[in-house]
Amino acid sequence: VKSAGGEWLIRIEDLDSSRVLSGCAGDHLALLEKAGLKPDGEVVHQSRRIPAYDRLFKRLHESALVYPCRCSRKEIASAASAPILGTETRYPGTCRDLEIPASEIRAWRFRVPEETVEFRDEVFGDLSEDVLAQVGDFVIRRETPERTYAYQFAVVADDTAQGITQVVRGADLLDSTARQILLARTLGFPIPRHAHIPVLVSQSGEKLSKRAGGRELPKLASSGRLPSIVAALLTTLGQKPTLEEALRTFDPSRIPKQREIRLAPPP
Ligand SMILES: [Zn+2]
């Protein structure tokens, strides 16, 4: 983004309170800054944007683009978070044409149109997805145990509100892209460009997030190893090993077309 003259923005996607560790986002931002990566604008927290999501939801509701669902708590809970690769199942449309009393509503789902979404990812190339056939009507808002907006809906609202033109994120979210494009198109929003980069995983294949060692990050910041870590990350993405050089010579075509990169075993 910086090498193309753009502004680099960060958003903390913290709507799923069951998966938020307090202090973790702050640690990550502090570490990025220490590594020389400072965002160009204010960091947006999704948890503070509920009124904006309420307004957008009202629009979808008034246009009958969402419908209530009373399927099981377990089914809906997993559907509202950012998907974890390989854990998604297609919603068969159980509640699509039912009249559901207000007291039984557990979630609201987007009525997915019958169309194939085609898009170009700047790393993975031309892709397409028939969202209705592969995912089904997806959850926009969960009503139980408390009201929460789904990841898929919030990012579309935020991308438009922030004027995002280029999304760069982990390839674990590649499969969410068609859903977000469909929603944005339905709402008349501009569609950002997308680039999905490989996600670093442990030798056992786990994502290197807070679930697998991410809490070690603050220690790294004071260990003097940051420059070598930044160099390793840039090299992994096919780029020059310092931020200064990478900024001058960044070439997206050298980013590996892989969803995951497994960490090498320690020497
Ligand atoms: Zn249902």
Image (tube, helix red, strand yellow):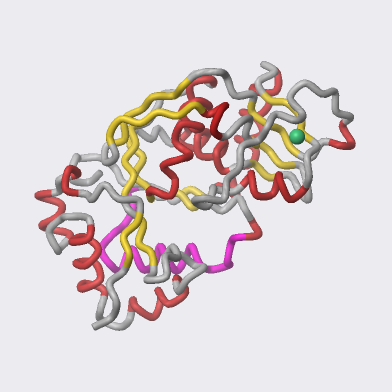
Classify the position of ligand 1 by quadrant: top left, top right, bottom left or bottom right. Answer: top right
Q: Considering depth in this image, is 39 or 239 the residue closer to the camera?
A: 239
Instruction: Tell me where residue 221 appears, x and y as whole percent.
Output: 33, 76
Question: Looking at the figure, which quarter contains the C terminus?
Answer: bottom left
Instruction: Tell me where residue 29 appears, x and y as whole percent.
Output: 40, 62
**Left or right, residue 260 beside residue 123:** right
Q: Which residue is drawn at the image coordinates 68% and 38% (left, top)?
A: 141
Relative to 31, say whether 143 is above or below.
above
Q: Considering depth in this image, is 49 or 167 the residue closer to the camera?
A: 167
Q: Which residue is drawn at the image coordinates 22% and 55% (left, top)?
A: 237
Relative to 51, say whether 229 is above or below.
below
Instruction: Tell me where residue 27 appears, x and y as whole percent.
Output: 45, 69
**Left or right, residue 24 beside residue 144:** left
Question: Looking at the figure, which quarter contains the N terminus?
Answer: top left
36 falls in the magenta region: yes
Q: Which residue is drawn at the image coordinates 34% and 63% (left, top)?
A: 32
Relative to 43, say whether 106 is above or below.
above
118 falls in the magenta region: no
Magenta stretch bounds: 19-40
